[in-house]
Image: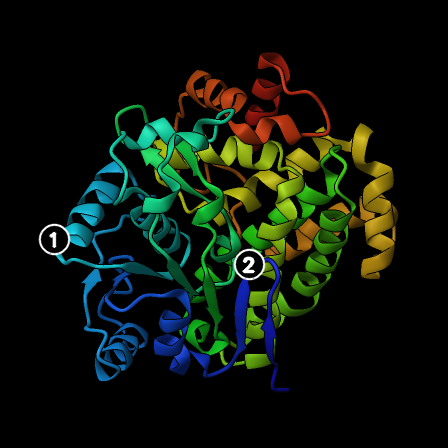
């Protein structure tokens, strides 16, 4: 089935197979005439990237690319990207790739016109108001995975390489002006990336749905996002060329990132410091943490997830939902513990400390303390 649509929520989105062909028009709509395409090292030389650069060059927009982006992008990558942006005289960014390319591209567009250090804009209180809003460059976002949903987000996760902490840089104008969601760009994803990114989208939806904060719109988006993952991630995993499944997973990714304006929780609070310290894949780390976190939060979420299970066609209420998660992880060869993920003798104190100061902590249905967070982490180990 061919799925093509134009959406205006949460930003202008061009959705459908083959729509990368509209990249030059998307730049024009965003007011960009000399873009810098920002992506990660793994994507830099792949056909989907070179073909996109060919389209830009043919339209007279040049073929400038910055790809010195690590899997967990840091402030060094950001500084190098800003330097490349300024040196090239660019007037906008095409953020291209998975979470790392999207997040770094958005930060380059945001920070290139600022004079204060990057960490002055961390998502704390009203720190975003420190930015010169008029100096923020426009962004066109092109996701090549279906997971983070950063293409519809107003923030980026950047690792502080000195402290090994993941920080959130936020500004409302970091929301891309135009998004191209072309499921054909995700066809070449390896199975383990399809699984990890897809389960990242699922974690966003689950945690948003379970967050105690009041946001009925996000609640509904999270619930339908879970359904799309349940129905289509196994298909995308089994057959990477299944365009219908790939398209629905791109929707689920955007829905998860839209929904988590309601809040996240312990899954992300733990996976952020784990990823920052041990450089694990974010979505896969979320998937490893999810079963234990669901049990940790059971007293507060059992009834809510029983409702979700009924909508998803899962029998057994909360326990049935948890069994589904276990089976889904197993079907995609997700490690059952952090040890299986490759983390030996982790610094428990450091991870717990990082989790307790993570912004996601405030959205967890049960208050996270040093004692219960340590016990939870030890279960996941």
The residue that appears at 31% across and 23% down in the rendered structure is 163
Dot 1: within a 10 Å radius of its alpha carbon, few (fewer than 14), some, or many (20 or more) residues?
few
Q: Residue 87 shows which numbered tag?
A: 1
Q: In terms of depth relative to the viewer, which is nearer, 303 or 2?
A: 2
User: Seen from this angle, which residue lies furthest bottom?
Assistant: 1
Left or right position of 299 against 157: right
Q: Residue 355 versus residue 325: which sits nearer the camera?
A: 355
**Pointer 2: what residue?**
198
Q: Could you tell me residue 31's position as x and y percent?
A: 36, 66
Which callout, 1 or 2, points at the residue further toward the start of the chain?
1
- In the rendered picture of this protein, how many numbered marks are placed on residues? 2
Q: In this view, does 194 lie to the left or right of 28?
A: right
* The N terminus, quarter of image: bottom right
Res 27 quadrant in image: bottom left
Q: Is residue 298 left or right of residue 15?
A: right
Which mark is in front, 1 or 2?
A: 1
x then y, percent, for residue 290: 62, 41
Identity of the residue furthest to the left in this view: 87
- At which x and y percent is residue 103? 38, 49
Observer-nearest of 313 and 82: 82
- Element carrying mark 1: helix
Q: Could you say which quadrant of the image residue 286 lies in?
A: top right
Gap in Å between the C-alphas at discs 1 and 2? 36 Å
Residue at (46, 78) in percent of width and height: 184
Q: Is residue 358 above or below residue 112?
A: above
Q: Can residue 381 be seen in this view?
A: no
Q: Are marks 1 and 2 in contact (CB under 8 Å)?
A: no
Give me the residue at 62% from left, 37% from top: 264
């Amino acid at each position: 089935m061919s799925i093509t649509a134009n959406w205006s929520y949460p930003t202008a989105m061009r959705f459908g197979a083959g729509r990368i062909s509209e990249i030059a028009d998307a730049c024009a709509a965003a007011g960009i005439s000399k873009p810098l395409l920002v992506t990660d090292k793994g994507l830099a030389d792949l056909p989907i990237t070179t073909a996109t650069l060919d389209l830009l060059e043919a339209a007279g927009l040049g073929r400038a690319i910055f790809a010195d982006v690590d899997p967990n992008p840091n402030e060094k990558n950001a500084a190098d990207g800003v330097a490349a942006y300024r040196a090239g005289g660019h007037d906008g960014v095409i953020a291209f790739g998975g979470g790392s390319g999207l997040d770094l591209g958005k930060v380059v567009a945001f920070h290139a016109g600022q004079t204060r250090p990057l960490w002055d804009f961390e998502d704390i209180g009203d720190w975003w108001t420190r930015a010169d809003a008029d100096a923020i460059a426009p962004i066109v976002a092109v996701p090549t995975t279906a997971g983070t949903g950063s293409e519809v987000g107003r923030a980026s996760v950047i690792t502080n390489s000195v402290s090994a902490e993941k920080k959130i840089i936020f500004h409302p104008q970091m929301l891309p002006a135009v998004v191209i969601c072309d499921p054909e760009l995700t066809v070449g994803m390896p199975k383990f990336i399809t699984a990890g990114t897809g389960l990242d989208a699922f974690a966003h939806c689950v945690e948003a749905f379970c967050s105690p904060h009041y946001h009925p719109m996000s609640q509904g988006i999270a619930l339908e996002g879970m359904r799309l993952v349940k129905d289509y991630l196994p298909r995308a995993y089994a057959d990477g060329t299944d365009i219908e499944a790939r398209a629905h997973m791109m929707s689920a990714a955007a829905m998860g990132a839209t929904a988590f304006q309601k809040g996240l929780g312990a899954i992300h609070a733990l996976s952020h410091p784990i990823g920052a310290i041990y450089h694990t894949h974010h979505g896969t780390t979320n998937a490893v943490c999810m079963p234990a976190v669901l049990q940790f939060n059971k007293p507060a979420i059992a009834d809510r997830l029983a409702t979700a299970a009924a909508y998803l066609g899962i029998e057994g209420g909360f326990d049935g939902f948890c069994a589904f998660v276990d089976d889904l992880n197993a079907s995609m060869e997700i490690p059952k513990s952090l040890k299986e993920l490759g983390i030996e003798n982790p610094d428990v104190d450091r991870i717990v400390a990082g989790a307790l100061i993570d912004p996601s902590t405030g959205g967890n249905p049960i208050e996270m303390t040093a004692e219960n967070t340590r016990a939870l982490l030890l279960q996941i180990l």
